Image (cartoon, rainbow, N blue to C red):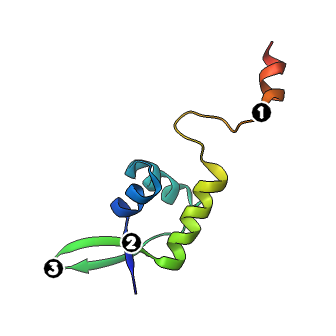
Amino acid sequence: MEKISISEAARQLGIHRTTLHRWIEEGVVPEPVAENIAGARLRYWTKADFAKVKKYKRENYWGQGKKRKGNKKARSQKN
């Protein structure tokens, strides 16, 4: 079974680790499996769960502070 750590997931997704930690806390992505190895607590996703994280990012994340393109209605209401 391939294990993908939070740090590795962040690298592959091109986002910061704190973004992943926030998504975990908000419950919008699966909780990583936790394992104690030599006194260290390691958290990782299985390949199947990481696919869910990638799907969430693709559908809901457009970059830091960026809104989804095509949201002109909200902008025009401010003017």
Q: What secondary structure is marked by label 2?
A: strand
First in sequence, mark 1 or 2: give its number: 2
Label 1 and label 2: CA atoms lie apart by: 34 Å
Left or right: 73 in relation to 66: right
The answer to whether the residue labelled 2 contacts the one labelled 3, judged by CB atoms less than 8 Å apart, is: no
> Amino acid type of disc 2?
Ile
First in sequence, mark 1 or 3: give its number: 3
Q: Quadrant of residue 67?
A: top right
Give the residue drawn at x 46%, y 49%: 19
Left or right: 12 in relation to 49: left
> Amino acid type of disc 3?
Ala
Residue 49 image offset from top left, x and y in percent: 53, 74
Q: Is residue 10 above or below residue 61?
A: below
Residue 65 image offset from top left, x and y in percent: 56, 33
Give the residue drawn at x 60%, y 47%: 61
Give the residue drawn at x 44%, y 51%: 14
Q: Which residue is mark 1?
A: 71
Residue 78 image offset from top left, x and y in percent: 79, 17
Left or right: 28 in relation to 79: left
The answer to whether the residue labelled 1 contacts the one labelled 3, judged by CB atoms less than 8 Å apart, is: no
Q: Which residue is mark 2?
A: 4
> Amino acid type of disc 1?
Asn
The label number, if any, that marks residue 38 in the structure image: 3
Q: What secondary structure is marked by label 1?
A: loop
Residue 69 image offset from top left, x and y in percent: 71, 36
Q: Quadrant of the C terminus?
A: top right
Q: Is residue 35 above or below residue 76?
A: below
